[in-house]
Image (cartoon, rainbow, N blue to C red):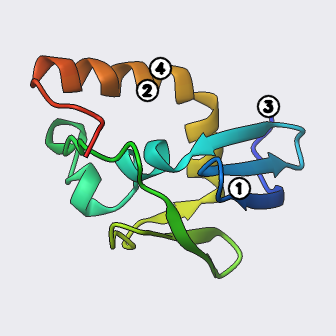
Amino acid sequence: MNTTAPWPASITYNRAERQLRITFEDGAAFCLPAEYLRVESPSAEVQGHGASTKVLVPGKRLVSVRAIEPVGQYAIRIVFDDGHDTGLFSWNYLHELGQQQQARWSQYEQRLREQGLKRDP
């Protein structure tokens, strides 16, 4: 069993495509759209204080990343152009977001439909 935390080999942000590309030393590589990162932010503002209190964040289709700031040796802070900047994206969480992207995105879109909300601002 591999208990080593994932470690990023490279992190780049493509402004034109609004995507964060992260490659890990274990060979995993993910392209994570800014919208996906914003609606899955690890901040308490989005995650609440448990799975049942997670906040649905609509209207972020056009959100972009203004800045990416390192936080120690374990995370990055992503500053979004809508002013959100309180989530610390750890290497583990970014790896998890990449691995679970399809399932999480499907759940997000389903929740939007159920509540009559849209991705567009």
Circle nearer the N terminus (3, 4): 3
Q: Which mark is residue 105?
A: 2
Disc ID at residue 1: 3
Q: Residue at x 61, y 68 (%)?
A: 75
Do the residues under discs 4 and 1 have CB atoms within 8 angstroms? no
Viewer-nearest of labels 3 and 1?
1
Give the Cα separation between the discs numbered 4 and 1. 23 Å
Q: Residues within 10 Å of mark 3 (few under 14, many from 20)?
A: few
Identify the element where label 2 is drawn: helix
Q: Is residue 5 above or below residue 43?
A: above
For the residues labelled 1 and 2, the Cα–Cα distance comes to 20 Å
Q: Position of residue 119 (x, y in %)?
A: 30, 35
Pointer 3 and pointer 2: residues touching (CB < 8 Å)?
A: no
The amino acid pointed to by label 2 is Trp
* Separation of marks 4 and 2 at Cα, in angstroms: 5 Å
Label 3 to label 4: alpha-carbon separation: 24 Å
Disc 3 to disc 2, C-alpha distance? 28 Å
Q: Where is residue 100 shown, x and y percent of the image?
A: 55, 28
Per the rendering, the mark at residue 103 is 4
Q: Nearer the viewer, mark 3 or mark 4?
A: 4
User: Which structural element holds mark 3?
Assistant: loop
Could you tell which of marks 3 and 1 lies nearer the N-terminus? 3
| Residues at discs 4 and 2 in contact (Cβ within 8 Å) | yes
| Label 4 Cα crowd, 10 Å radius (few <14 / some 14-19 / many 20+) | few
Q: Nearer the viewer, mark 1 or mark 2?
A: 1
Task: Give me the residue at 21% from left, 43% from top.
Answer: 54
Does label 1 or label 2 sit earlier along the sequence?
1
Q: Which sits earlier in the primary sequence, circle 3 or circle 2?
A: 3
Secondary element at image label 4? helix
Dividing the image into 4 quarters, which one contains the N terminus?
Answer: top right
